[in-house]
Image (cartoon, grey):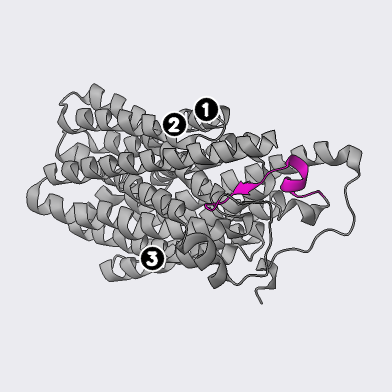
Amino acid sequence: MFSFLKPAPDAKVKVPAEKIEGTYRWRQTGVLLSICIGYIGYYIIRLIFTTEQNDIMKAYGFTTADIGLVMSCFGIGYGISKLFMGALSDKSNPKWYLATGLFVSAILNLGLGATRNLYMMMFLMLVMSVAQGMGAAACQRTVQLWWGKKWRGTVYAVWSSAHNAGAFVCVAVVQLATLMFTGSIAAVFYTASVVSIIIAIFIVFAGADRPATVGLPSVGEHTGDEVVLDDGKATAAELTDLSLWQIFVKYILTNKIVWAITLTSMSLYLVRYGIMSWIPSYLTQFKGFDPGTAKWLVGIFELAAVPGVILMGAISDLLKDRRALVCIGCVIGLLICLTTYFFSTSHIAIIVVLLIMGSLIYAPLTLVGLMVNEAVPKFAVGSSTGFMGFFQYIFGETLATALIGILVAKFGWIASNTVLYSAAGLALLLLLYIAIHEHRVAKIVAADQVE
């Protein structure tokens, strides 16, 4: 029944040598469009509840604690899902895996629009999170399969900007549905599902499995791309006969650098969701913003990060994969911006730092996602993505939604400020350790090139 999710076989007919370069570029264009637009679809579904939180509280009589519980159900389920669905993506056809997760998410999202029951919403969010866990792993595996290190940081950043563009498109879909259906909350959920189903169909036609499945040489053969593992050994393998558990133990669970990158990402996710998830409530309740303006600022916060994320990805390529150094600079700038966001009373200053913080949060989040993929063989990329995602959402997003919602209800917004400062500081310390590891890898690569 699910045989279409299995990896496609290598093509029997190979692309002629003189056409490989042009065919590679053409295929890469389609693949990049499929993962970028596809992940925008995932975000349209994922953020509907966040953008509508004020209207839902008003219409359904929910509190901030209720909203936090629903969002934390997604975070808990998504974290567990990413661990298992990420590992399964290593044994899948990433094109069909990506499309299937989006289609199932869209169907479940229809249920969220059809109920006003808090517990049913929590259940639907939990189930939807499983399907959502299929998205990032398929996309990140696709990047590793189709691009070598020379351009991977830039391409990965372009894909990662789909997170931000997706949030903005989500707000646009909300506003369009609100205008067309006279403020119906249910219609907003239904509209988002229809848009995402259309995107899922696009993925099927524009995407592709590995290069070998369309008659092209693997990216390792085409560019000489290899992965330097934690023990200093290099590999270019794309497939393996190892079981999922063997892959997980050998390349993830016992890999110190994977742990360091994962904990960094978890800390940055806490900051990300601690800001983004509470923009509508924080700015209206504590800073005196108009509710409509605060809702749009969720999308603007995300969209404004796109140029900065792509720029930082390109800089990390120019620095020959010294991605932790770029992240360190971003986190230092983030700590400065957080201070203004928390303590300024100027609406203009708050909006400006929100625009800046988008890049300073999402650039290092993007790069650590790439770094954890580059720390393992290509056949373990989905597992590394899932492992990191487990910590991002089980601990990072859950602390940023449920815990912050409860703390704010009891102690006020100063509690949120303390949590976010601590998380950013921990990320900075871990990045210093990762930067030392990057320097060691750079020396190994340089020594190999000399030989």
On the question of residue 169 being in view, the answer is: no
At horizontal 64% and vertical 34% (from top left) the residue drawn is 150
Q: In this view, does 333 lie above or below 149?
A: above
Residue pictured at 8% horizontal, 53% vertical: 410
**Residue drawn at x 56%, y 54% as measured from the top left:** 376
Q: Check contact, mark 1 vs mark 3: CB within 8 A.
A: no
Q: Give the range drawn in magenta.
A: 216-231
User: What's the CA distance linking mark 3 and mark 2?
Assistant: 31 Å
Residue at far left of view: 411
Q: Could you tell me which secondary element the residue under label 2 belongs to? A: helix
What residue is disc 3 on? 77
Q: Earlier in the sequence, mark 1 or mark 3?
A: 3
The amino acid on which the numbered mark 1 sits, given as a three-letter code, is: Ile
What secondary structure is found at the residue carrying circle 3?
A: helix
Residue 381 placement, left or right of 48: right
Q: Do the residues labelled 1 and 2 touch (CB within 8 Å)?
A: yes
- Disc 2: which residue: 326
Q: How crowded is mark 1: few (under 14 residues within 10 Å), some or many (20 or more)?
A: some
For marks 3 and 2 on the same chain, the one whose residue lies earlier in the sequence: 3
- Residue 209 is one of the magenta-drawn residues: no
| Relative image position of residue 294 (x, y in whole percent) | 27, 36
User: Disc count in the image?
Assistant: 3
Pointer 1 or 2: first along the chain: 1
Question: On the image, numbered disc 1 is attached to which residue?
Answer: 315
Indicate left or right for 139 with 424 as reference. Answer: right
Image quadrant where one finds the C terminus: top right
- Estimate the spatial distance between the alpha carbons at disc 1 and disc 3, rounded to whole Å: 34 Å
